[in-house]
Amino acid sequence: MEALRDTFGRQITYLRLSVTDRCDLRCTYCMAEEMKFLPKRDVLSLEELEQLAGAFIDRGVKKIRITGGEPLVRRDIMTLMARLGRRLEKGDFDELTLTTNGTQLFHHADVLASLGVRRINVSLDTLDDVKFEKLTRRNRLSEVLRGLDAAQAAGLKVKINTVALKGVNEQEIPAMIEWAHGRGMGLTLIEVMPLGEIEEDRVDQYLPLTAVQDRLAAKWTLSPLEMKTGGPARYVKVEETGGILGLITPLTNNFCAGCNRVRVTCTGEIYMCLGHGDKIDLRAALRGDDPEEALNAALDRAMLQKPERHGFDISERGAAPAVGRHMSVTGG
């Protein structure tokens, strides 16, 4: 079949597929404490998620990242991972991975490795118990750290994703980098994104990574790297630690020119851009009379609607978020 290519000539080779909007943490920059989660009847079955992933594979997608919410809280998620793992083993696509908060990782790390997962991203913003509980509204840092131990013992390559938060973890960032690199893990810093209504104002949370990089460059030697992992990060090597530092900068350094990805929610809605509200319903295509034809037609329409760039902005206190939906709904 014809590869997925948008009107700007960018080929889509990377699918971020959400399997649930539910999460066992409540990170303050991501969601409200009293979240209203989707009714289970609205969420795609594991069979439908597999069928959807297969449609993207047939159109040239080479990397699939399973996301949530927290993907490992989805019941029987390893069934889906195993089915996708079989297609990975056959060479139908190149990489199966996931992003997790790490709380459930201890229970699943060995199985993930056996199914062909080679590397994972773990979201972790602090190593301080008090800060962790304040940020996530849950006291579960020890479970995350145990999960990291299990993942590395299983042979999984781990990258830590850290959201840089003004006045919260900005002073801890160098220590986190040293900790991650000391364990053989990369670390990627991410600017906070204006997605969904939360209790706090994101102006108060926003820490530009240009400022963070300047501070790190005064402490260490940061050597730019040409490496690519399929996502939006730029990478440098920290010469003193020997490790890799990634920077995801949707606000200070727009990364849209090379966008190769789309996101599909657990309800089967495809979002062509994280920073836009445009979406197309793939669930209706899946459940129609001719799912294969309908899905391909829907994907073709999605390529016509994929915008050139996002419209994120955090500059005005009290402003509504750029997009009303939470990241946990879109797929992290």
Image (spheres, grey):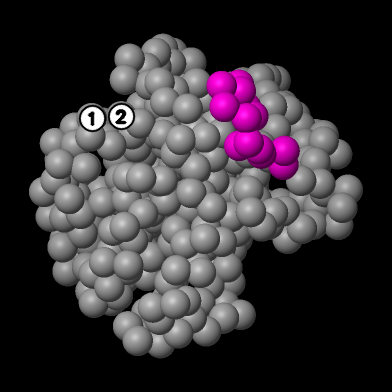
Residue 274, horizontal then vertical, whole percent: 63, 39
Q: Which mark is residue 26?
A: 2
Say which amino acid is labelled 2: Arg
What's drawn in magenta, residue-wise? 310-323
Residue 253, horizontal then vertical, whole percent: 66, 57
Helix, strand, or loop for circle 2?
loop
Residue 3, horizontal then vertical, whole percent: 77, 55
Magenta stretch, main secondary structure class: loop
Does residue 230 lie above or below 319 as drawn? below
Residue 97 horizontal side relative to residue 268, left or right? left
Q: Could you tell me which residue is drawn at 54 percent across and 46 percent down?
A: 16
Residue 182 position by quadrant: bottom left
Q: Which mark is residue 237?
A: none
Mark 1 or 2, nearer chain start: 2
Residue 22, horizontal then vertical, whole percent: 35, 27
In the rendered structure, are the residues bearing label 1 and label 2 in contact, judged by CB atoms less than 8 Å apart?
Answer: yes
Q: Could you tell me which residue is drawn at 35 percent across and 45 percent down?
A: 167
User: Can residue 241 be seen from the camera position used here?
Assistant: yes
- For disc 1, the marked residue is 137
